[in-house]
Image: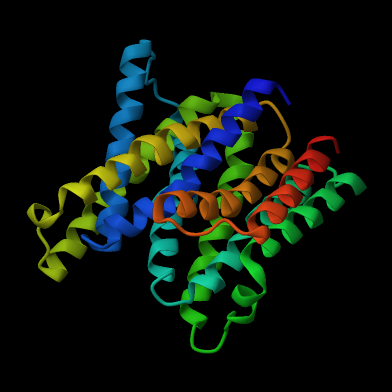
Amino acid sequence: MPVYSTIGLVVACFFWAVSFIATKVAVGAAPPLTVVTLRLLVSAICFALWFFLQGRSWGFWGYRRLRQLFLLSLFGTGLHYGLQTIGLQFTAASNASIYAVTGPISITLIAAVFLGERISLRKGIGIVVAIIGVLWVMGIETLRSFELKGNVLGDMLVFASIAMWGMFTVYGKKLMGEMGAFEVIAMTTIIGSVWMVPIGWAEMHYRGFSLSSVTPEAWAAIGFLGVTCSFLATLLYFMALQRTESQKVGIYMYTIPPMTYAVAALYLGEKIGFNLVFGSILVLAGVYLTERG
């Protein structure tokens, strides 16, 4: 993989790691689907401006292509963000953290079945090492607190959002070969923001919520989520995906939990312990093995 693609993936995963803190701030001041809608609108505006500044043509790709883009917008934008946000309200944080680890595995399996990407022994070992690293960062106490009883709804929603991201990654890669990475990400985000608007409006109407009650801190968090996470990070991720296998790109998602712990330590003053340091080393080792597989 080219060096600039590797750097782009690391930056993207860092933004996604920070997004957990930003989402917590935003949801504390606005309903979840409203946050998702505003986040997508911000990112859609970013993509539209980029299109304009680059002098790109919007074009018309026909019914079949628009149908594919709409399905990708379901998998990778509104439903993915919405189900995950709502699911976290019904399940334990430890459950969600463990389930999130299965994301790259979903990508690997889907890519192997539908794109014919081979899972070599070294890739398999790399995935296992990365999983062990993530679990090590979480620590034995987090794993012991894992519960299934009473969290079925939330667990199912989080699982569904993870599976959707895997499908979005794999099928997005296939469509990028025909349209280009930027065009696919831009159109899926814009389409996703359009059909999320009535959903967000309905939620606000049902809850009697007004945008005027959103705090400046929450607006800053929503802006961060839209510009860096849904726009820049997703673009960097798929630009790298266009240049290499889905499995090698997906493995970088394992770096998100350790970086989330590190950001929380710096932002919230939490202690950086042995689990974080050693687990992060294992994650990086797993990424290295998969890259060389």
Estimate the x, y position of residue 192 in percent, counting from the top left: 36, 45
> Is residue 9 at least partly visible in the picture?
yes
Quadrant in which the N terminus appears: top right
Quadrant hosting residue 191: top left
Estimate the x, y position of residue 252 in percent, counting from the top left: 65, 43
Count of numbered circles in the view: 0
Q: Which is nearer the eye, 32 or 277? A: 277
Q: Is residue 176 left or right of residue 83?
A: right
Above or below 84: residue 112: above
Image point 59% across, 59% down: which residue? 163
Image point 67% across, 39% down: which residue? 249
Q: In this view, does 231 lie to the left or right of 244?
A: left
Estimate the x, y position of residue 72 in percent, counting from the top left: 49, 45
Q: Which residue lies furthest to the top in this view?
A: 55
Quadrant hosting residue 23: bottom left
Above or below 267: residue 178: above
> Is residue 242 at least partly visible in the picture?
no
Quadrant in which the C terminus appears: top right
Q: Which is nearer the eye, 74 or 258? A: 258
Q: Which is nearer the eye, 179 or 119? A: 119
Quadrant hosting residue 204: bottom left
Image point 10% across, 68% down: which residue? 208
Image point 30% across, 62% down: which residue? 32
Estimate the x, y position of residue 211 in percent, counting from the top left: 12, 53
Q: In this view, does 201 lie to the left or right of 44?
A: left
Q: How is the image coloured?
A: rainbow
Q: Which is nearer the eye, 273 or 37? A: 273
Q: Residue furthest bottom?
A: 149
